[in-house]
Image (tube, rainbow, N blue to C red):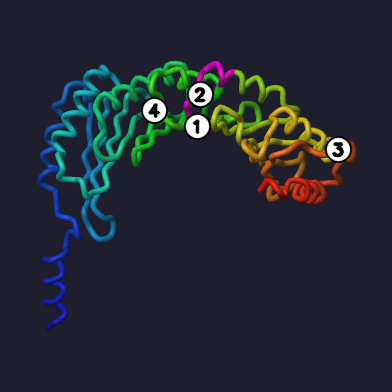
Amino acid sequence: MRPVVLIAILIALFGTGCIADRSAEAAKIRAAVPTLPGVASSNVSYINDFENGANLRIELDMTDATEAQIAAAAQRVNDLKGDAFDSHRQDTTVTVAPRAVVSYDGRLDPSTVAANASLVRAVRAHSDAGSIRLLEIDGRSRLEVWSSADPDRDAATALAADGGPETLYIRSAHPARHSSWEVTTPLSVADFEALVRQRDRLPAAVPWVGVDSGRISGLSVNLGAPATAYANLAAVIEELQPSREHPVQIEWRLDGAAPHEVGRITVCAEAADSAVPAAGFADLSDRLAAQFSACA
């Protein structure tokens, strides 16, 4: 068989990939969504080829829409898609406030879309963060707030909402001054505020805090000068009271250290005597590795 004929046959059989082409259905969605109440603008992208796979992406600008209109639009999109795109990668992104979106794969209950929009709007109302995204992917929800000037406030606002996301990631615009947060919920606002006070008692700069099961479970800390670094770390550990049931992952640095000099330890017990200062990064790293090796 001639190569040209073979290529023509392959294109005919597999030209749009192994998943049935849904261009016609995508075109119907593209025509329908601009007419939905509250939709200021829209974009529907459909790709189905070997290089990219089968993808449907829907973008709606509903910045000025009511939450009832957002829910109605989500229901209409679900109806338009039906089960035609179940074998496709799907992404629906709805802009609900300036630089703030809710995004989800597949089909999502319209009431959840509206509730997510309400939460994102509540955070945006008190935040000048660079961007806010509430993602629902593979059945899990995550709120991301990027370049936040006040991560403590943005986290508390998100935690105050009913039925919030499973995780929060609040990325500080200035980590050296205000900690970023990564929080696994549930966590009440009162409990979060207690963790803020606990962080503020630590004798070290804390660029990042991780929270799980209502406790601080991870930290990124600057321990200061080598002479006082071990004592500072011992005070951090004493405040957090880690245990084998609740270990704490600590990433640490020293003042003036080279960029690659970053230590990581898992702590599950009190620190030893802190009277002997560390000679530098290598010395402190060796001491900590020996002391906490059983916790890893």
Camera-side residue of 81 and 164: 164
On screen, residue 287 versus residue 275, left or right, reads left
User: Is residue 190 one of those drawn in magenta?
Assistant: yes
Q: Do the residues bearing badges 2 and 1 touch, measured as CB atoms within 8 Å?
A: yes
Query: What's the amino acid at mark 3?
Result: Asp
Q: Which mark is residue 267?
A: none
Q: Position of residue 26 (x, y in %)?
A: 15, 43
Camera-side residue of 175 and 104: 104
Q: Nearer the viewer, mark 4 or mark 2?
A: 2
Under circle 1, the secondary element is strand
On screen, residue 279 versus residue 30, left or right, reads right
Q: Compute the Cα span from label 4 to label 1.
A: 24 Å
Q: Compute the Cα span from label 4 to label 2.
A: 26 Å
Residue drawn at x 65%, y 37% as measured from the top left: 220
User: Is residue 152 one of those drawn in magenta?
Assistant: no
Q: Compute the Cα span from label 3 to label 2.
A: 34 Å
Q: Which mark is residue 99?
A: 4
Q: Do the residues bearing badges 4 and 1 touch, measured as CB atoms within 8 Å?
A: no
Q: What residue is disc 1 on?
A: 184
